[in-house]
Image (tube, rainbow, N blue to C red):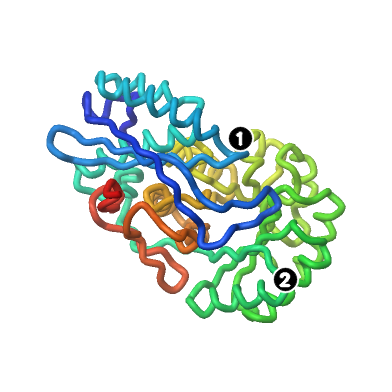
Amino acid sequence: MSSPEEGGCGSGPAFEYRSFSLPLKRPLESATGTIESRDGFLVRLVDDDGNVGYGEATPLTGWTESIDDCESALERAGDAVERGDQRGALEAVDRTVAARHAVTLAFADLEATREATPLYRYLSRGPLVGRVPVNATVGDGDPSETAAAARRAHERGFDVCKVKVGLRSIEEDVERLRRVRDAVGPGVELRADANEAWTYEEAESAIEAFAALDVSILEQPLPAGALEGHAALRGKGVSIALDEGLLDHGIDTICEAGAADVAVLKPMALGGIDVARQVAAWATELDVTPLVTTTIDGVVARTGAVHLAAAIADVPACGLATGELLADDLARDPVLLEKGSAVVPQAKGLGVDGAWEE
C-alpha cells in the first residue's frame, strides 16, 4: 500500500471536505457516556482522470481530537494536497487521528480505484475474501430488554453478541447476561464490554460469574492505565480484550505487561486503516488476537473497517454491524449483513457510491 508520504497518488488531486451530522436512531449509553449523533467530515479526492477517493473523519470525545482540531488539520492537509505535497498532507494530520484516518483512507481509496481492485486486496495483496464474521452489539437495558435484543439479533443470523455492561451493579449485569444466555442458548458466543467501568474487585467478581455463563471475551473491564490489573484478570475463564488501553499504551507495552488476550482495533481512533493493519500484524506476531470495531461511524469509515477486517487473516467476529444504529447515513451502505457476516464489497476501492451527494 502506498501512502501519501511515499507519493503513491502522484501530485495534486483536488481535495475537498464537508461537514455532516448523523443522528442515532436512539441514544447509545455506555459507561463512558451517551452518544446521540455522530458529527464529522467527509473528505473527497479527485484526480485528473476523474478517479475519486473518499475518507471520513468522525471525532469522538475521549478517543480522538476535538471536532475543531480535526477541521483545522483537514484544512492544512488540503492546502498541502493542492500544492502536490503529499508528505506535507500526512504531516498536517499526524497528531489528529480522526483527520489522519480521513486523509489516508481517501488516498487508499483513490489508489485502489485507480488499480480497479477492492480496497482490502489493495491493502493485503491477498486472496479474494467474500465475508468477514461480525457481532451484534446489545446496548444497556434492563434484563428483559437486553435478552429481547439479543434474541432478535440471533433470529437475524448473528451468532456472536456483545453486551454493553458497567452502567449497572455487577449483580444486575450478571443477571442481564444470564437472561441473554437463556434467550439465545448455548450456541451463541457472548461477549461483554465494560468501557473501563469497574474496580479490580468488581471485575474479578464479574468474570467469575461470566465464566459460568460461557462469556468468551470481556472488553476493557478496568481503566486504561491498569495494565497490571488486566494482566491479573487473565486466565480466569474469560479472555481479556483491551480497547482504550491499546490507545493509551500501544501493543508493545500491552504485550510486555501480558495484559490482553485480544486487541480491539478502532481505525478512527488509531489514525487510519494503515496504522490499524500494522497493529494487527504485530499483535498476531505477539500472540494477541486482533479484532476490528468502529466508533459508530458513517458508511465511508465503516466500509473501510470492513475492508481492513477482510485484509486480516482468520479475523474473529468484528464489531462492524453498527450502521443500523444510525437514523441517517452519508450514502447507501454497500455492505450486506447476512447470517452473522458482512459481505465484503468487490467493487474497486471502497465501493461506496454517492457519498458526496447531499
Q: Which secondary structure, mark 1?
A: helix
Pick the residue in front: 215 or 128. Answer: 215
Q: Position of residue 294 (x, y in %)?
A: 50, 50
Q: Are marks 2 and 1 in contact (CB under 8 Å)?
A: no
* Identity of the residue drawn at 29% across and 33% down: 16
Going from N to C along the chain, the mark reached first, 2 or 1, is 2
- Residue with the mark numbered 2: 142
Can residue 270 be seen at all in this image of the molecule?
yes
Q: Position of residue 185 (x, y in %)?
A: 64, 81
Q: How many marks?
A: 2
In-image side of 12 versus 332 (left or right): left
Q: Which secondary structure, mark 2?
A: loop
Pick the residue in front: 20 or 50. Answer: 20
Q: Would you place residue 10 above or below residue 354 in this image?
A: above
Query: Which residue type does callout 2 highlight?
Result: Asp
* Identity of the residue drawn at 68% across and 50% down: 195
Q: Position of residue 183 (x, y in %)?
A: 65, 81
Tag in front: 2 or 1: 2
- Residue with the mark numbered 1: 250
Q: Position of residue 148 (x, y in %)?
A: 62, 77
Can residue 312 be seen at all in this image of the molecule?
no
